Image (cartoon, rainbow, N blue to C red):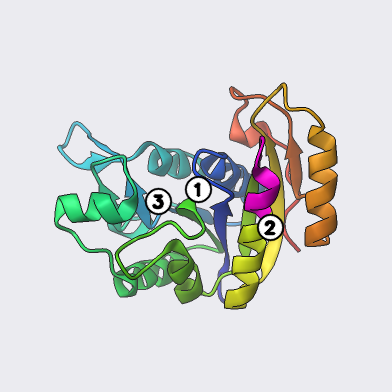
Amino acid sequence: MSALGWFVTGTDTGVGKSRASAALLHALARQGLRAVGMKPVAAGAERDATGAWVNDDVLALRAASNVQVPAEDDNPVCLPDAVSPHIAARRAGRPIELAPIVAAYRRLASRADAVVVEGAGGFLVPLSDTLTGGDLAEALGLPVILVVGLRLGCLNHALLTRDALRQRGLPLAGWIANRLDPAMPEAQANVDYVAAQIGTPPLADWPWAPDAAPAALPLRLPA
């Protein structure tokens, strides 16, 4: 049987994709599944004790996974500079190509029951002059989980992302409301609006709790 898989994207950068991906991995593990995270493209890294480049989001996914895999599979592209991936790749002299990433995903899927793939930035973040995160999601062919960072402007971003998914024929497996602004007015009204427009309640509606461990966050698994 093929591994379960999801592509986690967000309404913007910094909206909680890594938190959502880690929470999903923990939820899958509680179901007795071998679950592994993947960050195909990470921009912003430091060298570890061995001299290898490591990214904080990748480390968080590894900590939440219960399957150990080679670094070249769960993070095929790790770029030092914390800028847009297409710029980071240009600076590093390392063009981002889809075929090696898809091959790495397939290797992960052969070793686990479920693979959670975390995208970079928002859905259409540029990976090169011709590729975006949307092209990567389409190449992987996975259902998408959308993390909506609840703050002013999130409704526009949520609907634009929904429409971009529809244009590519990618199924939206669910969405997560992550409250980023504890003082946001009418936050619940925003959640209700997104639910009505997407046609389903959120898989999770997380309150403002920046220090909460992903394993402790409630989450309903996608159907």
Residue 128 picture quarter: bottom left
Where are the magenta residues, as a range?
A: 149-158
* Residue 143 seen: no
Q: What residue type is labelled 1?
A: Asn
* Residue 186 seen: yes
Residue 135 picture quarter: bottom left
Q: What residue type is labelled 3?
A: Gln
**Which residue shows up at 46% across the image and 44% down it?**
61
Instruction: Reply above or below: 156 against 105.
Output: above
Q: How far apart are marks 2 and 1 (CA)?
A: 34 Å
Residue 84: x and y in percent read 34, 48
Q: Which of marks 2 and 3 is in front?
A: 2
**Residue 159's disc number:** 2
Write down the residue under mark 1.
Answer: 66
Write down the residue under mark 3.
Answer: 68
Instruction: Reply above or below: 183 against 126.
Output: above
Residue 36: x and y in percent read 49, 54
Q: Distance between the residues labelled 2 and 3?
A: 36 Å
Residue 223: x and y in percent read 76, 64
